[in-house]
Amino acid sequence: MDGIYSHPPDEDGGKLLETHLRDAASRASELVPAEAKTVEDNLLEHLVRRTVSVHDIGKATSFFQNYIRGNQPAGPKHHSPLGGYVAEYVLEKTGYGDIERLSGYLAVSEHHGRLPDAREYVRKRTLSFDERKEEMRTQVQDVSENPEARKVAEDVIEKATDGEGSWTEFAEQFESGERFTSVKELVVSKYGNSLKELDEGLYPLELQLWSALTLADKTDAAGVPTDDLRGENLDPGVLERHIAALPPGEGERERRLNERREAARKEVLDNVEEFLEGNGGLGTITLPTGLGKTYTGMSAAMKIRNLRDGDGRVVYALPFTSIIDQLVDDVIDVFDVEPTDRTLTIHHHLSETVVETDDTDVGASEEYMLGESWRTGLIVTTFVQLFESLAGPKNSQSLKLPALYDSVIVLDEPQALPHRWWSLVRRIVQTLTEEYDATVVAMTATQPRVFEAGGIETFELIGDVDEYFVDAERVKYVLHDSADVHLESTGEHEPLGYSDAAEEITENDGESTLAICNTIASAEQLSSEIEETAETVNVNEVHGNHLEKEDTALETADAVLAEVEEKDMPAVAHLTTRMRPKDRLEIIKSVKKLTEEGAPVVTVSTQLIEAGVDISFDKVYRDFAPLDSIVQAAGRCNRSFEHERGEVVVWTLAPPEGKENLPSKTVYSLFGPSLLPVVAEAINSVRGEGERRIPGHQMSREAVESYYRKLHEKGLGEEELVEWFDDAEAERLGAESLINATNSVDVIVARTSDEKMKIQEIIDANDEGRHSKAGDLVDETKELRVSVPLYTEQDHEAVSRLNPVGENYEGLRYLKTSSDDSSKFDAKRGLVVQDDSVEDRFL
């Protein structure tokens, strides 16, 4: 051979194996803090460097060398399994303990895959009849018999062990079975075959080692300059100047509110130093909706970062994709940056690019890796991306973990985290603060007791929380008679029918009204009844008529306003996840303009509008739900203090047509412990007997405190998830999700001529074998997709009638809409499917 390469020798020269191992080890060691220690009190940087310096040593075989030169290999070309055994040998020779050796073995063995369940994986891999053992023996023999490959292997191991080890010794021990025994005894008792209890520090260390290896390996293979892995931080002075330039407001109440917003922000900033001087791990900001939590949280995160060392990143995590765009728009506007800069990354399921790479590490673009690895100064993402990447991450998800060192992580609306994950989230936050030296700030109006049971010390950055809630009181809550279905357990009360609900809503002449439903079927029926009850201008239809035009939201809003004034009738808008993200965003913008103009508008929505959407309605109706959801819904009422008090009506809607269960029970009772009795108990604790009206601060403070106290007593978090984390059961954790995941198919819905042309371009590119081009075009359709859960055979059958995008895109279909056929797509409601899911909003 003319050299031992790690990546194909081509016209660019390829890359020699020794060079790649040296460069990747250098990169990896730079990704971890110089002072970070392992659970066994060794420098993490040294452990990372030694491990990464041998990870690809299995590529020295003639089998792999022939493979990357385009020839048919005469033996096994895989290289990771052998690399795992070499890594464990190197760590043993240099004095590392069991946890470190096991971490190194697992990280290298699966550096192209997903981390496995540690104990079972090792037990199976070290069995006497495992077929991989014979394949690796063939590989070891091949390297030993090839002088060029053997020299490379000797040099690599000698450097990795500071001269304490050699390829010759490793090969002898491998042939004798000593290396298998050494690895096996890390998890299996020496006498017998029982599995050992693993140290709870194993998995955090394994994640750190594996993620540093995968990022260094992939970026070196792709030739990404190391400077590109260093992001740029946003200047907090820009935000300060922007806030200082904001107008004081019109009217005494608005000026008073703005003064309270700024007072809260300054109080948080004043308390940051005391927070850092104490534990500096987990802080909370508890403020009512409308008091500027976003600017406060961002200001606090930047100050914390600068007071620490100024090098850490700010990660701003939210529960729903539907509210990310609004935050990003604010960041772009205030700081004059773009997501393509080194300052900002937007990362959720509509923004990420999925790239599968093969054993040569070639194929992932620099843009993809930089986006996936969160190397910019500010990352805006979802809870799913953050917490699932620290639980049981896919290989691509691991790339972001090194960015979390010394970071400041803002959790906006943490009460939206599913209760079953609360215990695991506590454990993950503990890992972030202890192993990654991150600072976490949980920020919401309804602070849950997620972290209490874990014994994590928290620091409230607001002194007198209640004072702000009283000052910023904007709403009163009204308990509809139908709410007694849940509030009283007599069984004598009836839920509200949709025609009656529609009649009550349409009686709000001249007002802007929001009705939030628990299921899509419920929202669809309520919208239909409203349209039957009163003559309306349909925002969704007008939006569809203007899709071919530019400035769609402005065109739609202006057109609706003109129709509302001309016909003297209210507008009605419909929002669910059966609509494309692109359409939802445009309709939200249109509704916002209508409310600002004082036009009468009724909006019927599922929970996707519940948090972070900056629209203010005169009146809000909320189907019975967990208390935090009710209070979050109230955040859309009288948001800008247009009135002395807005009104939030809590009612219980009947089952929609063709359904047996109340929507409230469908979502909050059927798939786990029922939360509704706890809600009823908390509400009843703050109202007098028979009282139907509750002041805003009583509901948002006293009732919420009672609600979370009772949930805390019930212990809703699944401790099994924590056990899996502590036992390094990565495969099990990887099968879990923050959302109630079901089998689903994404449908690209093409409504305009340009969108339909793009579908055809994708098909043509696929047919012609231009798969990279097809992939780029598919990525451009993210905001045109609707996710369809497949619950029943009928769902599968219905989706199967839609056209597949191509054989390379399993689970992705497309639909070209037609004005002549509303059986698959309705301009008012979106994709026509049956679904009672709320999961899409979390992605």
Image (cartoon, rainbow, N blue to C red):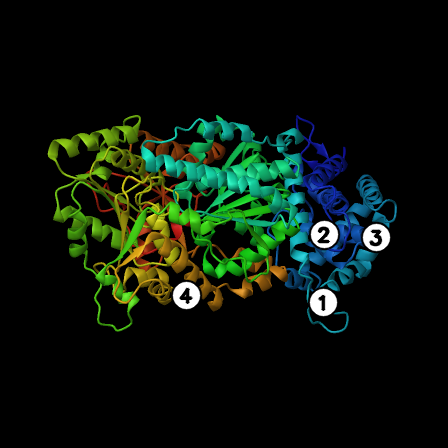
From the viewer's side, name the closer residue of 810 and 569: 569
Q: What residue type is labelled 1?
A: Val
Please say if 515 is above or below 147: below
Say the numbered circle drawn on residue 104. Answer: 2
**First in sequence: mark 3 or mark 1?**
3
Locate residue 457 relative to residue 717 in the image: left or right. Answer: right
Q: Nearer the viewer, mark 4 or mark 1?
A: 4
**First in sequence: mark 4 or mark 1?**
1
Q: What residue type is labelled 2?
A: Gly
Please say if 346 is above or below 530: above
**First in sequence: mark 4 or mark 3?**
3
| Label 4 residue SS | loop
Count numbered badges in the picture: 4
Tell me the CA gap for discs 3 and 1: 21 Å
| Label 2 residue SS | helix
Q: Which amino acid does label 4 sit on?
A: Gly
Tell me the CA gap for discs 2 and 4: 39 Å
Tell me the CA gap for discs 4 and 1: 36 Å
In this view of the protein, can residue 161 be seen by the observer? yes
| Label 1 residue SS | loop
Say the numbered circle drawn on residue 93. Answer: 3
Q: Are marks 3 and 1 in contact (CB under 8 Å)?
A: no
Residue located beneath label 1 in the image: 188
Q: Crowdedness of circle 4 by 10 Å Cα count: few (<14), some, many (20+)?
A: few
Q: What residue type is labelled 3?
A: Lys
Residue 282: percent from the left, percent from the top? 58, 50
Residue 29: percent from the left, percent from the top? 72, 40
Locate residue 353 relative to residue 68 in the image: left or right. Answer: left
Rendering quarter of residue 236? top right
Residue 682: percent from the left, percent from the top? 37, 63
